[in-house]
Image (cartoon, rainbow, N blue to C red):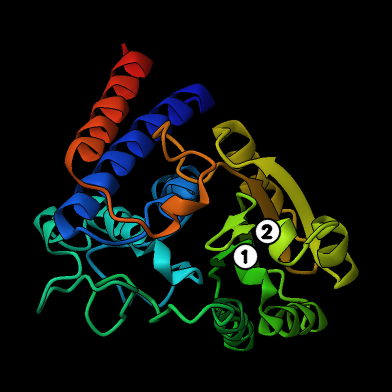
Amino acid sequence: MTNNKIIAELKKKAQQVRIAIIKMLGEAGSGHPGGSLSATDICTALFFHEMKHDPSNPSWDERDRFILSKGHAAPLLYVLLAKSGYFDESHLATLRKYKSILQGHPASYLTPGVEISTGSLGQGLSIAVGIALAGKMDKKDFQVFTLLGDGELDEGQIWEAAMFASHKKLDNLCAIVDRNFLQIDGNTEKVMSLEPLKDKWESFGWKVVEIDGHDFSEILGAFENFKNNYKRPFLIIAKTVKGKGVSFMENKAEWHGKPIKGELLKNALSELRMKGKNEHE
């Protein structure tokens, strides 16, 4: 398949993922749309192009691992897992309901394909580092990917893990920062300034690239770059738009964890379906 065809397929898939996210959040009447939609494109590329995994065998020893460190973006992970075939898509309508396999944050003991329970911010990178180190020690040929929120970088444990990963030269580890510049309390630079973010990670010994997190050509290029074996951990700073795809949500911190319902739900679905139709005609 040519690169153009791959990108066209990924764009189509990402639009389906966004629609499914909004539908399931509408059914639940709660959840986190903003950060789920901002990371949709890069995670769609991961699950449907980049990662080596087998939905029929979630515990396959040689699978690549994905750790959703920003666990509140669980709707995104659930849709990716369902559309990959880890469980039936009918479960998406049960999000946050009693006895559902899909709770408000990922629970590895409930949901096939979820590597680790997450939700307490700042811990996912440490977990990913541990798995990557274990892979090295066991001489396993798998990669470890983890998605971090930019607001999550306020947590001190992130930087301890960054230092350790560099010390251990974990070149099988790829961390992705969903850099949408918004967290629940507002602009990241006003809450706790992160810039110059690239310089900070590089000073910790990481190979760092910055990309447009909604440009599939740049996303795929970054994952190719990760394979260049820099003998150190790899970070992708993916510049994104919070609430990407739904115009009234875009770049609005209030949609970090706000329920969507009624006319707004209808409008969001209508807009996403129209965009999908226009892009693929």
Comes first in the chain, label 1 or label 2: 1
Which label is found at residue 72?
none
Q: Is residue 15 left or right of residue 132?
A: left
Q: Residue at x 35, y 64 (%)?
A: 74
Q: Residue at x 74, y 46 (%)?
A: 210
- CB atoms of marks 1 and 2 within 8 Å: yes
Q: Position of residue 92 (x, y in %)?
A: 17, 57
Tell which residue pokes out farthest to the top in this image. Answer: 281
On screen, 21 above or below 215?
below
Q: Position of residue 193 (x, y in %)?
A: 78, 62
Q: Position of residue 3 (x, y in %)?
A: 53, 27
Which label is found at residue 151?
1
Q: State whether residue 172 appears in this view.
A: no
Q: Is residue 188 left or right of residue 17?
A: right
Callout 1 crowding tier (Cα within 10 Å): few <14, some 14–19, many ≥20: many
Q: Residue at x 67, y 85 (%)?
A: 157
Q: Which residue is mark 2?
A: 188
CA gap between label 1 and label 2 equals 6 Å
Q: Secondary structure at mark 1?
A: helix
Q: Secondary structure at mark 2?
A: helix
Q: In the picture, residue 160 is in which quadrant?
A: bottom right
Q: Residue at x 61, y 83 (%)?
A: 126
Q: Is residue 65 left or right of residue 205?
A: left
Q: Quadrant of the C terminus?
A: top left
The amino acid marked with disc number 1 is Gly
Q: State whether residue 17 appears in this view.
A: yes
Q: Is residue 249 left or right of residue 54?
A: right
Along the viewing direction, whichever of 103 and 189 lies nearer the viewer: 189
Along the viewing direction, whichever of 226 and 107 lies nearer the viewer: 107
Q: In the picture, residue 182 is in which quadrant?
A: bottom right
Q: Position of residue 71 (x, y in %)?
A: 43, 71
